[in-house]
Amino acid sequence: MKRVFLVIFFFFGLLLLWELAVRAHLWSPVLLPAPAKVAEYLKSAAADGSLWQAILVTLKRLLLGYVIGLLGGIPLGLLTARFRLLHDTVGTLALGLQTLPSVCWVPLALLWFGQSEAAMLFVVVMGTLWSVIIATDTGVQHVPPIYRRAALTMGSKGFHIWLTVILPAALPFIVSGMKQGWAFAWRSLMAAEIFVTILTGFGLGQLLHYGRELNAMDQVIAIMFVIVAIGLLADKTLFAPIERLLHRRWGTSQA
Amino acid sequence: MYITETFELPRNASEHVKEELQFLPPSKLNVDRVSKTFATRTGPLKALDEVSLQVAEGEFVCLVGASGCGKSTLLNMIAGLEKPDSGSVTADGLRVTAPGRERLVMFQEAALFPWLDVLGNVIFGLKMKPHLSRRDRKDVARYYLELVGLSRFEKSNIHELSGGMKQRVALARALAPNPRMLLMDEPFAALDALTREQLYGDLQQIWESRRKTIIFVTHNVREAACLGDRVMLFSPHPGRIREEFLIKLPRPRDINSIDLAEYAGRITRSLKGYKNGNGGVAE
Ligand SMILES: Nc1ncnc2c1ncn2[C@@H]1O[C@H](COP(=O)(O)OP(=O)(O)O)[C@@H](O)[C@H]1O
Ligand SMILES: [Mg+2]
């Protein structure tokens, strides 16, 4: 209870500082709008639906690309862990491409797919895929061989072992790879949306971009808030529960 | 002794469960002149040299020797996890070529699966029996958890258990698919003396009540004399069986008894005699 109170107090304090800075006219109100103005924008954008529309468009791109990245990355990671040749080829490729900041895929995506949903999707998939492949591969390499041997003697073999032993044993690694992939995908999608106008749907990044074009600082700040909130929410609803489960099962420290 | 006398099955346990818990005749084993050489950085290493071993149905045999003399290698061969370069392993007249759940292994290190709870671990080996329903598997697993005295911990995570409890779960997991032979590779080596003593008692009791053939690897001479009908002595480089001792003591045996100490002393003197030995052997 005390913790909750302190958190509220902290953020309320930040808000207060912001308001004071505005009142003190430290910066022009065009550059630093009052908190109330930002809230007003959020309210109107929520009321006319443009905010929800943008959130929907962005999340759809993100989730679809992310799921594709996972569905491709986890099996590929298992394959690179299983077959040395694939490890040396695809694994090395993944390692290299993972070091590439995923926003660097944007120009290529535009040339290949034009200003389309496919380009957005491509950027998200590239952000997710390589991290997940590498994490899955590493996770499998770290599975103690004794698990496999124990499963073998209990009559499990082949695909069954991979599904019921190797995959769950590698889960802590895979989940951290999924988290990294999510972060990369989210960042590169925002960058792509800010750079590129896609006529089939206005995402949050595009709202941010038009905020700048219109010199509407309240819009820019408001959208930044929304982006932060979505990031936090994803962490708390998607990854935190999985990580808690892993911590509880494996007995690793409750970080 | 019938199991239903000792433990109560759930009243609505299915016929499958009763069938699953039935006694199977224990295995007979014949290891015939197996050899195994490993390629190592310092050249070929002969881990086993023409080792032969016969084990009768329901016998409890201990393999003793300094570390590195091929005990685990032999056990893995019997399990089907490793192939001999020459010679053969035959269980109940069938050549062993692959692992199978008639011969289950219990390892020294924790080989329990941390992503499953205690019950889930014991159920794992039952998943490969398609005629059992989910309920049946639970009933069978609970029976064995009760046998090792851990019913109350079925929902626990593996990391929450003490070393002794972990090995009890591992024992329950190895027993659950109803193997005809148990292969145990230094299962108690990492436990403290008190916990170990308790487990000696329990293992002897379970061995008598569930009638399995057991091959038990240890480097602890007293442990071998306490558990085995027969103790086989290994010498290293290359790994060979040098001698065997019949332990003619009544059961259940107490690890601290004087008769047992006498056997242990004789075995230890023999072990020390092997000039090739390089590792110490605990008494
Ligand atoms: N997979 C392997 N590769 C190379 N050498 C091995 C391998 N497994 C065992 N050895 C060697 O074979 C010898 C016997 O090993 P092991 O059977 O584990 O002995 P023990 O269980 O009696 O301690 C040891 O010297 C060990 O280093
Ligand atoms: Mg060993």
Image: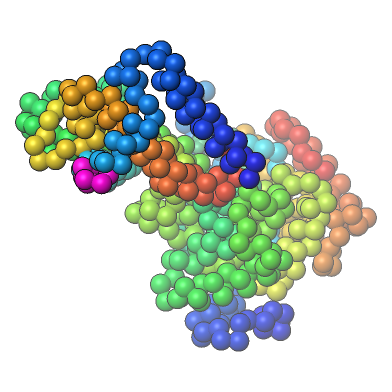
Residue range of the region highlighted in magenta in the rendering: A46-53
Specify whether B43 is left or right of B184. Answer: left
Q: Closest to the observer: B222 or A57?
A: A57
Q: Nearer the viewer, residue B224 or A237?
A: A237
Task: Give the colouring mode of the picture.
Answer: rainbow
Instruction: Quadrant for residue A35, please give it.
Output: top left
Q: Relative to B157, is A19 above or below? A: above
Q: Residue at x 25, y 46 (%)?
A: A47
Q: Magenta segment: does it hold A36?
A: no
Ligand 1 occupies quarter = top right
- What is the quadrant of residue A84 in the picture? top left
Residue at image position (63%, 81%) is B9
Q: Is residue A47 magenta-colored?
A: yes
Q: Quadrant of the N terminus of chain A?
A: top right
Q: Is residue B85 left or right of residue A97?
A: right
**Residue found at the far top of this picture:** A26
Residue B139 occupies which quadrant of the picture? bottom right
Quick check: can you spot residue B230?
A: yes
Q: Residue at x 89, y 52 (%)?
A: B262
Question: Does the magenta stretch mainly form a helix, a strand or a loop?
Answer: helix
Which residue is painted at 56% across and 50% down in the image?
A: A249
> Measured along the vertical axis of the image, is residue B35 above or below residue B196?
above
* Percent position of residue A122, x then y: 17, 35
Q: Considering the image in quadrants, where does the C terminus of chain A appear?
A: top right
Between B275 and A72, the one lying in front of the other is A72
Say above or below: B63 vs B45: below
B5 on left or right of A158: right
Give how far across and how far down residue A129 sits, in percent: 27, 36
Q: Is residue B161 above or below residue B48?
A: below
